[in-house]
Amino acid sequence: MEKRSIGIGLMGLGIIGGQVVRVLTEKAEMLAEQAGCSLVLRKVKVLPEDLKRPLAKEIPAALFTTDDDEFFNEPGIDIIVEAIGGENPARDFLKRSITSGRYVVTSNKEVMAKHGAELQALAQQHMVGLRYEASVGGGIPLITPFKHDLVANDITGIYAIINGTTNYILTRMAREGIDFPTALKSAQELGYAEANPVNDIEGIDANYKLAIMASLAFQTVVKPEDIYREGISRIGSRDFRYARELGFAIKLLAIAKRVDNSIEVRVHPVFIPEDSLLAKVDGVYNGILVEGDLIGKVLFYGQGAGPLATSSAVVADVVASAQDIISGVGNRLKWKPESGKRLKPMDEIETQYYLRLSCADRPGVLAQISKILGDNMISIASAIQKETDDTAQTAEIVLTTHPSTEKAMQQALHHIEQLEAVREISNFIRVEEI
Amino acid sequence: MEKRSIGIGLMGLGIIGGQVVRVLTEKAEMLAEQAGCSLVLRKVKVLPEDLKRPLAKEIPAALFTTDDDEFFNEPGIDIIVEAIGGENPARDFLKRSITSGRYVVTSNKEVMAKHGAELQALAQQHMVGLRYEASVGGGIPLITPFKHDLVANDITGIYAIINGTTNYILTRMAREGIDFPTALKSAQELGYAEANPVNDIEGIDANYKLAIMASLAFQTVVKPEDIYREGISRIGSRDFRYARELGFAIKLLAIAKRVDNSIEVRVHPVFIPEDSLLAKVDGVYNGILVEGDLIGKVLFYGQGAGPLATSSAVVADVVASAQDIISGVGNRLKWKPESGKRLKPMDEIETQYYLRLSCADRPGVLAQISKILGDNMISIASAIQKETDDTAQTAEIVLTTHPSTEKAMQQALHHIEQLEAVREISNFIRVEEI
């Protein structure tokens, strides 16, 4: 099958969809050379309010439709780009796109995290491509590397700074010594955090992205609800001071690790050595460290969001889809998530810990705490004790531990909390030596 | 065309070829799933001395041949992996592989840098795939990103630490204050530098890799001889001291920049800001920063060499070739190096400079030097003057400049050298604000 042009249908004319239109239009000639055929925008499915956007005036009115059936019945569409976002109705639109024989490109992390297995099986059944590079890490190549470049590796770990908003907030806290609410407020004022920031600061966005990467890397269906998740709102400026004192940076990491035939998947704040490369990934940037048996450590770094970077990934996927259509290739990429790997319950993971405790300032408290840790087979790596409040007679005790299971640590924390001399467990943060 | 198995022919059983055999054998089941068919080693072309290697005993003797014709006439070979290295006879073998209708995978940077255009045109003509991910950056995905993921971008710059040996030597010099000969000797003793280190330390290896990347990124044939090249042997421990004082790191960079419709390509030591991410790429690691109009800055980091990392890229290319063969796809990737971009002569490049001069220790010398720079329209950004030798009455003057053309700087250096008070131009190193 040799075609001279490939028709594109776009769903959604928001900030991503609009930028995709701009790239397809302004770079039409270059993209035609790369794809081996011209890429022609045939239809744009919009909501009535989208028609009021300035960009809408630059697009011929005949391309717009607000009607689903009209969009899907347009015969000239070979590739559908979904840029609506959110779970519904995007999921139904994607299914309808696939079952109608269109190749699909999406930037939708929520749908791919929650329904990726279903959609990929459907695409395989209908012999069409389903590409989603833009769903993780904006323009940073990640999906293609997992599907192609790293395919000979047994992936042993993914350690990812994959949410720009939280990394921006943590970077401000680290550099300026400000507390979380102040850093969040500033990030919101500057447009780096949304008015309702819960998806970012509670790690939900990172959770979706980890579900997508872990499913690919370990050829196992990892759903968002399988992933342990903690956000960054508990982190205080004091934690950053101790981290520095101990030689660590604090980052929100999305971690997927394989130990034997088990996989652990978790999103939470982590102490990492300050001289590790991930510790240098600052501001809104993303950094994704992948470990494999052949490649060792590979790091991918770049802008993980924003309309320009995201459009780079979407349009690359459109070009690859067009090449497949021209070559008569159906669903090129295998999806066989049948590795039989076991998802490890959080209780079983093993890591190191940082603990910050507010205690009565009197002799023997550290001994009591050490005993509880020892009873739970947890050994202390370092201890700092500082007087913090003479009037209240409280001292702050900061401990780091050698590796222990999460279960042992949770049991120890439960007992430590009940000590009469312990006023508060101010924080505990996991430590990863990466 | 549906095939149950794809036959592999391997040329060369050195350290890379041997590791490729190991991966194909040990991971046969996993790779078959990824490729959609089994990958079967059908023939290994060796030199007589290869048969004495320990690995040779693990491979059925019937697979070996020392005869070219026997190898190329083997009917069961669909994909040929070239792991011989060097320009000849590898070039002829690759041509013969392509013209005999085999898909080709190579890790050979020298051949691809010197003859990539010829070989890719030939592959296109014979409708077979030619893949060479392993030729640059070991297991770090670079060729695929340029051919696929970044395809919607106008690439504006590549700044690459792409040679592990020189980066290891420079890292040792920076950390330990040792001089170049000492660092080189130690690198040789530890196996990080070859007995004859000229290819690495003179930037020849980096030059080949830059030719490959620049050709892809700018869709122009960039040959090794088009690239300006300087090695690292001139760098002294004093340069590292001044670099640190001025807030810079020293790295050997392979640079390809597009300015309007011109391209500059050069390999030489560079001062880069010490807080840039590339400055943190230490030891034998590689770091490749790519700038594009949509993605902004993306960095790829990892082990740029070694048999394991290289085999990761080779085998990924084999799997992709097998997928193409099964799908009936010929030469998937476009090669149209017809962009008409102009290669800028070194004279015309604009950058900043660091100069270190040994001068007579008397008044007015800095004024004389400043006048020459000013006469050549070069303005000074910073100046450091230190007495270095009371007996010889020499002082060391260190200058950094604002951007100027290379031509102006070379003219200025020519005049500065002729000043009676200037004993020696100890070094000059370009500065890039990346």
Image (cartoon, coloured by chain):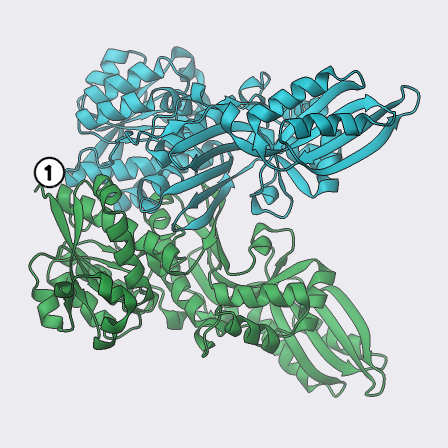
Chain colours: A green, B cyan
As drawn, is A29 to the left or to the right of A381?
A: left
Q: Nearer the viewer, residue A269 or A397?
A: A269
Q: Vertical placement of B149 versus A108: above or below?
A: above
Classed neighbour count for the residue bearing mark 1: other residues with Cα under 10 Å, few (<14), some (14–19), many (≥20): few
Q: Nearer the viewer, residue A294 or A142?
A: A142
As drawn, is B170 to the left or to the right of A315?
A: right
Q: Where does residue B77 sit, x and y in percent of width and height?
A: 22, 26
Q: Nearer the viewer, residue A335 or B347?
A: B347
Q: Quadrant of the N terminus of chain A?
A: top left
Q: To which quarter of the image does residue B105 belong?
A: top left
Q: What residue appears at the point 78 percent right and 29 percent down from the top-left corner?
A: B367
Q: Where does residue B395 sit, x and y in percent of width and height?
A: 84, 26
As drawn, is B358 to the left or to the right of B145?
A: right
| Chain of the residue under the numbered disc 1 shown in the image | B
As drawn, is B215 to the left or to the right of B323?
A: right
Q: Vertical placement of B105 versus A71: above or below?
A: above
Q: Is residue A230 visible?
A: no
Q: To which quarter of the image does residue B432 belong?
A: top right
Tag 1 secondary structure: loop
| Amino acid beneath label 1 | Met
Q: What residue appears at the point 55 percent right and 60 percent down from the top-left corner?
A: A283
Q: Where does residue A73 sit, x and y in percent of width and height?
A: 7, 65
Q: Which residue is mark 1?
A: B1
Q: To which quarter of the image does residue A30 belong?
A: top left
